[in-house]
Image (cartoon, rainbow, N blue to C red):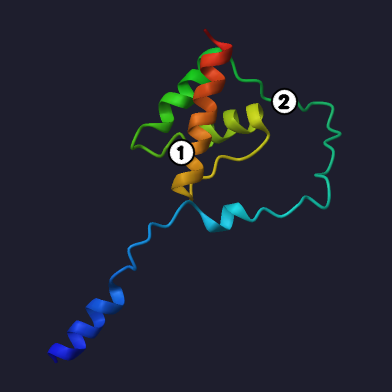
Amino acid sequence: MEKELKDKINSLKSDGKKKKGCTSCKKKKPITELPPIIEDEDYIPYIPTMDEIKLAYVELNRKDNSKRQFVNKVYNFLFNEDFDWGCMSCANSQANKLKIYITENFK
């Protein structure tokens, strides 16, 4: 019994190396086809205001996840990519990217 527990503990221990970042995000696939063109005459693109961009950055730091769609919509407009909520390292780098954008453009 003790031997089985020791073996299980040893198998669960890490090798001491810290894993860096997200491995699935590092291998991005190239875009092979363009998205369809929207030909609706009533379509009005969403353009966030300065206050909405600042609010999106503030909402990133909150524990409440109810504003994820709003943050994603603003981030998608600014950088033409979706905010990655699944990967912590990618989310941190995207949050830094948004912070730099705000400090450079809204001094």
Pick the quarter of the image with the N terminus: bottom left
Q: Position of residue 28 (x, y in %)?
A: 67, 53
For residue 56, side relative to residue 46 (left or right): left
For residue 39, side relative to residue 102 (left or right): right
In this view, the residue farthest toward the left is 2
Which secondary structure, mark 2? Answer: loop
Q: Position of residue 29 (x, y in %)?
A: 71, 55
Which residue is pictured at 74% across the width and 24% down the height? Answer: 44
Q: Amino acid at mark 1?
A: Asn
Name the residue carrying label 2.
45
Q: Position of residue 19 (x, y in %)?
A: 42, 57
Count the marks: 2
Q: Which mark is residue 92?
A: 1
Q: Amino acid at mark 2?
A: Pro
Which residue is pictured at 35% across the width and 37% down the height? Answer: 64
Label 2 crowd bin: few (<14), some (14–19), many (20+), radius 10 Å: few
